[in-house]
Amino acid sequence: MNRVYIKTYGCQMNERDSEQVASSLRDRGYSVVDNEFDADVVLLNTCSVRDQAEQKAIGKAGYLSKRKRENPNFILGVMGCMAQNRGEELFDRLPDLDLVVGTQKFHRVPDHLDHLIQTSNGQGPRPSTLMDLGEEEGSQNTIKDHVSKTNEVSAFVSIMQGCNMNCAFCIVPKTRGSERSRPIEQIVEEVQELAVNGVKEVTFLGQIVTSYGRREFPVIDGKSPFVQLLERTNEVPGIERIRFTSPHPRGFKQDLVEAYRDLPKLCEYIHLPLQAGCDKTLRAMNRPYTKSRYRQIVDSLRAVVPHMYFSTDIIVGFPGETEEDFNESAAFFEDIGFDMAYIFKYSIRTGTPAEAMPDQIPQEEKERRNQVLLDILSKSSLQRNETLIGTTQEVLVEGPAKRGDAYMGKTRGHRNAIFEADERLIGHLVDLNIKRVTASSLYGDLVLAGVDTTN
Ligand code: 5AD
């Protein structure tokens, strides 16, 4: 009765939360399995950012109900954003659901499972269901344990939770609550521990990392708490690369631009959500910046790191986005020349301001606009990758590639690289001579000890 399978939907923050839950379950004597068919307990860690993500998890939960009929002791739980967003309603929708755990209660999962299991063993009346959705002070500090203390080359580190913005389209402030940051010291200790265990790259996670600690910790020498954290992390021996996601254009100040100039470990890749490249749409979205401000940030970063790589999030088909607005957005998107982008078709989220906005865009039109941006993206990322042919790129070797017997890793610019290598190189930084590229990947040969082995 103690084999748990966790399925994760959505963002890196969710991945990280699931890892935390797995770690706490292992400490409690549960075994975390990687196959739902071997499990006595299945926990779905869910995403609410778009309707499709919620529907997927609901479909999965419905399917898992079968297991309950075969085995009455089987336990099914929903955690995370959809749990927080829908709460009680989930029990109506999914009559076989046992457990609903919100985004501030991940650390309570072992207690809740213990309870459900004990009561189902005849040691007490089994509560039909258990729901835990409250706010919890300090819950941001509970996401700190990593599952595999070895073999991890790159690790996500959660630095804050919640979001105080109110973008008209977004459900996240409801599902994740308001901003709360972990102390710098505690984060640095976590990074040090990861480094001792062989981790070479850390990615800081937060809904809006540029807001990190702004109410809790002081600005020192003109540097925001977030930049102080980057500086401290840059000093940690063994850590070779620092990344983060996501900053917000509003909080993107000169101190962060200068961090790219001054901190060698900070990789020259940034994911900076744009959402729309048209001032009218940005205003309607309640995004407090203009496209010219966004452009300024991009330019100031390129001024300190000319080969900076840019990634973004952008939404097509926001209510009221006319053909003209979209064309303006697409032209701006093309003009920046993104290396990577996550393009989203606007999805109505109940309870958000945009839900009630007039002029919702028909699905086919959203599909069309989506395709226009995808085409622009594949052109710009291919063009950029082509400039890398013949260059030598530093790659952090992560492990075997998905197909064939090649290995994969990432360049500092977060390009996917595929190459012949040896298991012993996993976790090492290697130089790769780039021979061939696609829009999404670089293919190359290792340059070993200064000697190009292909010659
Ligand atoms: N519809 C479509 N995309 C959305 N996002 C957030 N809310 C919505 C929505 N209602 C996108 C934003 C955000 C990313 C994580 O998801 O681009 O940055």
Image (spheres, rainbow, N blue to C red):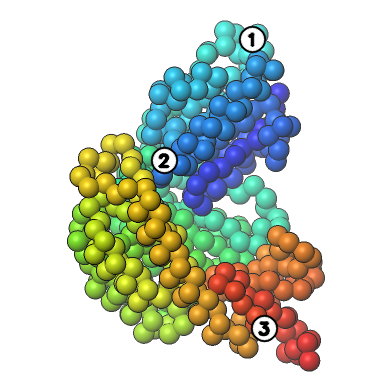
What residue is at 22 percent from the left and 47 percent from the top?
Answer: 359
Q: In the figure, residue 66 lies in which quadrant?
A: top right
- Label 2 – label 1 distance at C-alpha: 40 Å
Q: What is the crowding at mark 1: few (fewer than 14 residues within 10 Å), some, or many (at least 20)?
A: few
**Dot 3: within a 10 Å radius of its alpha carbon, few (fewer than 14), some, or many (20 or more) residues?**
some
Query: In percent of the image, x 47 and y 42: which residue is there?
Result: 53
Q: Which residue is mark 1?
A: 123
* Residue farthest to the front, as pictured: 364
Q: Looking at the image, which is closer to me, 166 or 69? A: 69
Relative to 276, is 415 on the left or the right? right
Q: Nearer the viewer, residue 11 or 152?
A: 11
* Residue ID for mark 2: 51
Which tag, 2 or 1, sits closer to the chain's start?
Answer: 2
Q: Which marked residue is nearer to the observer: mark 3 or mark 1? A: 3
Viewer-proximal residue, 445 or 173? Answer: 445
SS state under label 1: helix
Which quadrant is the N terminus positioned in?
A: top right
In primary-sequence order, the first of circles 3 and 2 is 2
Q: Is residue 294 visible?
A: yes
Three-letter code, disc 3 = Lys
Q: CA distance from mark 3 to mark 2?
A: 41 Å
In what element is the residue under mark 3?
strand
- Residue 29 shows in this picture: no
Q: Quadrant of the C terminus?
A: bottom right
Find residue 114 and report its horizontal and vertical position in percent.
Answer: 61, 23
Residue positioned 65% across, 80% down in the render: 436
Ligand 1 closer than 8 Å to label 3 CB: no
Name the element at disc 2: helix
Q: Label 2 is placed on what type of residue? A: Asp
The amino acid on which the numbered mark 1 sits, given as a three-letter code, is: Gln
Q: Which residue is mark 3?
A: 435
Q: What residue is rendered at 33% in x and 80% in y?
A: 299
